[in-house]
Amino acid sequence: MNTTFYHLNLINPLINASGVKCMYSSQLDELASSNIGSIVTKTCTPSPRQGNPEPRYYEPKNHLLTINSMGLPNEGVQYYLDYYKKKSASLQLSGKGRFLSLGGLSINENLNMLDIIYQNPENLTYLDAIEVNLSCPNIVGKAQLGYDFQNLESYLRVIFTKIKKLEEMLLVDMTKNVELEKPELKDKDDTKYKVLIGCKLPPYFDMSHFQLVADILNKFPRLDYINCINSIGNGLVIDSDTETVVIKPKNGFGGLGGKLVKPTALANVHQFYRLLGDKVKIIGCGGVSNGDDLFQMILAGATLVAVGSQIMIKGVKCIDTILRELEDIMEKKSYSTLDEFRGKLQYM
Ligand code: SIN
């Protein structure tokens, strides 16, 4: 099940979906002690946030979907940097990727967090990837940036210009013999010296939007991967017995996840796989609850696959079941590596 994600050699393609049981160090520890291949933190902001009022998460008994409007509760970026600093060695030893999700509420908050990360170059030795979340649907009064087609490109340009500047400064520091633990941080042209940069996208539903977003993303060669999809924003679940909504924030409107979103997730993974080609890898996220879902995500083109609602419902033990089920499928189909079927979806 070994999986290569650029220079990372991971034990398997699974990663938790950011937001699900990854806010506190105890929750991250639980993920770390499971057989998951990579770990991503709760999307964070420069300072800790309480998020939206409770109840802000709901799953119906049939487990077909989940709805949440958490509102980015998190412990602040420094907490997650400290966590990785403390746990980095053991995570690396067990072959797990270390992903940090950033979700500043303004572009300045994202730039500020990039400054915080890069101002201590040691941080980069504890991190494998930085993911900018462009798609949280649950912040009152804030539209999802991934749908703001007018401003998405200029927003990304500011972010990538900042990263370029910070990396150039890092190289200058390195020539001054700053001691960094990452032995590969030597060569400017060696992609290994870079922390991977990704974006978490909202789901798209129209072919013209896939094309539009892919055209924008293709303008940023420093973008290593996209993570799609975030929850389907602003769904409404109603309880007929009580005649009420089921979560409190935003009058019950919240992001939908779970089994019902899988076809939308597969469509986004596959269409972006077609439009972005080899240049940008894909983390598929949405509705993965068993080995067959994982198989389909990889068939659609995903390199890594996130599990969210299923971890919420069953706990981290679901990771073993999902991996075992994929192994069975691969054995039946005589596949010995994931690369043999990745992106090989056939059409009628
Ligand atoms: C939330 O905290 O509201 C969920 C995070 C997200 O959807 O990006």
Image: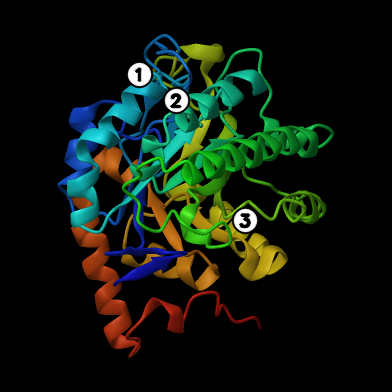
Q: Nearer the viewer, mark 1 or mark 3?
A: 1
The disc placed on residue 265 is none
Mark 3 C-beta to ligand 1 under 8 Å: no
Along the line of sight, the residue nearer the viewer: 329 or 212: 212
Mark 1 C-beta to ligand 1 under 8 Å: no
Is label 1 in contact with label 3 (beta carbons under 8 Å)?
A: no
Q: Give residue 204's position: percent from left, percent from top.
A: 68, 47
Is label 1 in contact with label 2 (beta carbons under 8 Å)?
A: yes
The answer to whether residue 209 is above or below residue 270 is above
Q: Amino acid at mark 2?
A: Cys
Q: Give residue 282's position: percent from left, percent from top.
A: 54, 59
Q: Earlier in the sequence, mark 1 or mark 3?
A: 1
Residue receiving disc 3: 268
Query: Residue at the location (26% across, 31% down)?
Result: 83
**C-alpha gap between disc 1 and disc 2:** 7 Å
Along the line of sight, the residue nearer the viewer: 341 or 185: 185
Q: Nearer the viewer, mark 3 or mark 2?
A: 2
Query: Residue at the location (74% across, 56% down)?
Result: 218
Query: Residue at the location (50% across, 51% down)?
Result: 194
Residue receiving disc 1: 75
| Label 2: which secondary element | loop
| Label 3: which secondary element | helix
Q: Is residue 301 left or right of residue 25?
A: right
**C-alpha gap between disc 3 and disc 2:** 24 Å
| Label 1: which secondary element | loop
Q: Amino acid at mark 3?
A: Asn
Residue receiving disc 2: 44
Q: Is residue 310 left or right of residue 278?
A: left
Query: Residue at the location (57% across, 42% down)?
Result: 167
Q: Give residue 67's position: percent from left, percent from top.
A: 45, 30
Q: Amino acid at mark 1?
A: Glu
